[in-house]
Structure formats: structure tokens, C-alpha cells
Amino acid sequence: MTLAIPEFSFSSRQLAGSGLLPILDRAVARHGTLTRLRDSEGGELVLLADAGHARYWSSHPESFIKDVDRPSASAAVVRLLLDDALTATRDGEEWRRSRIMTAPLVNHTAPYMTRDNHVCARQLADRLKAGPTLTELSGACDAWAIQLVCRPLMGPGMGEETATAFAHVFRRGFYQILMKAAQAGDCRGLAQDPDFLALRGHMDELTRRLLALTPEPDSMVGRLLAWLGPDADPAEIHRVVRNTVVGNFAASADNTSAALHWSLLHLAQRPDLQQALREEAAALDYRDWDMQRAPLALACVREALRLTPVSPVVERTCVAETELDGYRLAPGQPVLFAPWIVQRSERYWPQPLSYRPERFLERPKPEPGTYFPFGAGKRVCVGMNLALAQLTLAVSLLHRELAIRLDPDSRPVDRQPVFRSNLLPRGEVRFALTPLSARAAMPA
């Protein structure tokens, strides 16, 4: 006998007021980890918030797709904007082709990636040491993350001012069209929306500026041009470069920035870990970076991604009839996997709401299904290792050269996580920075 899925209803007013995450917490507290969420506007999806659900997803990836064609899905908005960029591809041959093309471009061991990772972390450390001692860090994390995307794309030829201006325009415009699509419940009308057209215009203008430059041969754009060949149609070159560049912004910059911000926020409350990070960093050469040589810094990043996953939910659609925990999911049923719930559950993690990187040193490999901040299944984030390498280097270098504390006047409410386009602190969080006078010598 198939069980009836319990329902949890909420209003659009509640969603706008408290955000999605408290709604998920209340739904699980009331009905358990498999619940139908229904909003007052008629939208519904099934929450899958158990480690067993994530394991099933990993072992049956063909059962759930990223539905870029369902007009009410957020992925459909990304598809409309980015066409066949990897993050917006349809499952199947289109996805496989894009993945094969993209994977070599985000290889974290590539020499140009290692070089740019070191350069961007060095710039961030110098910027913070030269700046005010009492400051918020979201802007600095943003600038670091934007440069991490831009330098490998084009090499140093793409100026920081151009990249930062575009990133801010894209972030604002993308959020606007996401909200319009959510309110309408259908993204198909966006193609003629003034905000959508303005954002596409900015994307095209950036692409024209990039192609007017001469990209370094080992940059992402240089490799793309070599892959396309000298006889490629100019319109096709423009389309591929535009979608790759903006796809990297959309998939990388915001999440990497937020992940570093959360890592610094958590570590600001653990001076003991900061001292241990300095001791670990003393023997490191950041120009020849291997994150496995910095196990504590890596553990600090992984724990931040557990406690505050920057992508706290993952939306998918059932392809075929699926049974989980005695409940039937019909074909076409939208579902929501929830790292936010699983990774913070006491069923799987001792002291789940405490920041304890030590757990990843004691047990580096979590139980299957209990940890998936980069997604699961075949569409796990292609840039996962690159992001971990970038975050680990930045965390290590910053704490080698700075003592970072929370401003004593900071408010706990401002540090509470809220889910917008990704997971961010609710308010402005200010930090007290103290450059360390006895910095160990580091190669330039």
C-alpha cells in the first residue's frame, strides 16, 4: 500500500518574510523528511531531506533530472538566459558534450589555475592588511571571487573594474528576472521583458569586449577559441564565449564568495583554530599549491560548507515513477533535495550546529548521503575541486597574515543564514582585522 505524502502549506507572505529555510525546518519538524510543500499560490514540490534520499539520488541519477524546460522551474530561467552553458544544459547528450568541453577548463591542477589562485589570494590578503581594521568582508570576498573567475577566463587583460561592474550588473539583473519568473509561475514571457533584454545586452557587450582583446592561449577563452577552430562562424564564437563566460560567473563567483565569507565568519569565533592554521601554513609554498598539504585549512572549508551550505537546496524533477520510504513520486514531480537539513541533522552529525572542523580530520570521508554541498549524482559541480583549492588557499594565507575576529558590537541576528540566490548572512557582519607583524617570508 502506497502512503499518502504528508503536506505542509505556507503562504507567499511567510516565504517573503522568513525565507525558505525556516519553512523547511518547520516542515521536517512536523512531518518528517519526506513532505509535500504547497504554497498559497498553488505551487508544490516534494521535500526529500534524508541521507537515504541523497544516496538514492547518487545511485539512480537517471531518476531525477535538472528540468530546464518546465516553465515554473528556476533552471528554466537559467536556460532562457544562458542557452547551452553547462549549468543550463538538458540531461543527456547535450549535457555530456558540454561537460566534456568544460571539465578541462576548470582543472584545479592546471598551471594557470594554480598561478591565478595564488595571485588572487595574495591580492586579497594585501587588500585586507592595507584597509581599515574594522570592516565588513563581503565586498573583499566578492572582489576575490570575481577575479578568480576572470583571470582564468582571459588572463590579466580583463581589468578588475570591468569584471566587477559586470558581476554586479549580472547579479542584480539575474535576481530581478528570477523574482519575476517566481511571481508569474512561468518564465516563458521573460524573453521580451525589458529587464531580461537589458541583461542579455550587458552579456553581449561584455563578450564583444572580450573578443576584441587577445586572450592568453592557456586562458579559458583562448582554449575555447582553439577548440572552435579558425573557421568557426563568428556568431557561433560569440554565443559559445558568451555562454561560457557568463555561465562561469553564474555558477562560480557568488557561491565561492559566499563560501569564503562563511569560512571567515566561523573561524573568527575560533581563535584556537586560527593559531593552528598559522602553524600549518608556516611550511607551505603557495605558488605550488596542493590543498592536501593543508589538511586543517581544507577541513575548515569543508565544515563551513557543511554548516552553512551556500546551495542549501537542489531542485530536480522525477523522470519515472519512484518509491521512497513507502511514498510514490509520480513522473514529472518536482522535488527538493536539502543539504541544509541533512548536513545539520543530529542523526548524522554530532553537535551538528557547532563549527567543528576537527570532525573532518577525525573522519575525512563522511557517510554516503550525509554531505553534498556540491550536489550529487552525475551533475555534481564540475568545479568542485577547483573551488575547494581556491577556498583552502585563501583561508590558509589570510590566517597566516591576519588575526580575524568579530566586531564586539556585531549582532547575532546579522549572522543568521538566509537563502536568497545562495546562502548569505542576514545582515552586515563586521570584523576586526589585525595584521600580524611577524609574517613568515613567502615567495612573491
Image (cartoon, rainbow, N blue to C red):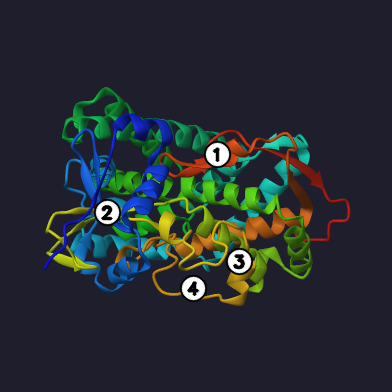
| Kind of residue at disc 2 | Thr
Q: Which residue is mark 4?
A: 366
Name the image quarter holding the C terminus. Answer: bottom right
Image-quadrant location for residue 188: top left
Q: Within 10 Å of the Cα at label 3, are there few (<14), some (14-19), or many (20+) other Cα atoms?
A: many
Between disc 2 and disc 3, the foreground one is 2
- Which numbered disc covers residue 159? 1
| Kind of residue at disc 1 | Gly
Q: CA distance from mark 2 to mark 3?
A: 32 Å
Q: Which residue is mark 3?
A: 299
Q: Residue at x 37, y 31 (%)?
A: 16
State whether residue 412 appears in this view: yes
Q: CA distance from mark 1 to mark 2?
A: 48 Å
Between disc 4 and disc 1, the foreground one is 4
Q: Within 10 Å of the Cα at label 1, are there few (<14), some (14-19), or many (20+) other Cα atoms?
A: few
Are the residues flagged by discs 2 and 3 in contact, CB closer than 8 Å?
no
N-term mark: 1 or 3: 1
Residue sitting at the far top: 194
